[in-house]
Amino acid sequence: MSNYQRGYEFEQRTRKYLQSLGYTVWRQGKSAFPDLIAVGKEGTLKLVECKTDGRIDWDEILAAKILMERTKSEFFMAFKDKRKLRFMRLGDYLKFRGWKNARKYRNGEKEKCKLEKI
């Protein structure tokens, strides 16, 4: 199975999970960023980047920060943890993965990293 196929299947799994929670979900084609856009029943906007390998590039981090500011939305990372689907807010995900400058993405809050229920 190619990396593209693995990523596509993970995006589909994530999309189906979000739909089961009542979100309307759009998948962006051609590897656009972010992978999924989800809107809740109350109109909340969630941007989701799916990563099977758990890696995120610096350019993607900066793009996510800009998107959050422009759309007033929350940005989540969806990733695999021992074959389970997990979600984390971007700042918590960066701390979880050991990024040194992650604190500035949580506006200086000193929270423990936690898995989020979307």
Image (cartoon, grey):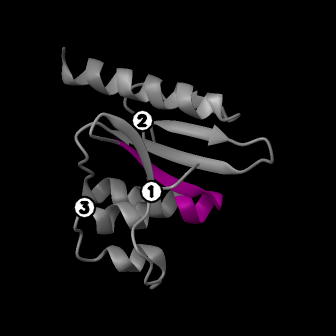
The mark that comes first in sequence, 3 or 1, is: 3
Label annotation for residue 32: 2
Per the image, the residue denoted by label 3 is 97
Label 1: which secondary element: loop
Residue at 46% of width from left, 75% of height from top? 106
Point 77% across, 47% down: residue = 43
Q: Amino acid at mark 2?
A: Ala
Give SS at disc 2.
Answer: loop
Q: Of the residues under marks 2 and 3, which one precedes in the sequence?
A: 2
Above or below: residue 15 compared with residue 72: above
Residue under label 1: 115
- Looking at the image, residue 104 sits to the left or right of residue 72; the answer is left
The image shows residue 44, relative to residue 22, as above or below, that is below
Q: Earlier in the sequence, mark 1 or mark 2?
A: 2
**Identity of the amino acid at label 1?**
Leu
Disc 3 residue type (three-letter): Arg
Q: Are marks 3 and 1 in contact (CB under 8 Å)?
A: no
Alpha-carbon span between mark 3 and mark 1: 13 Å
Q: Residue at x 62, y 39 (%)?
A: 38
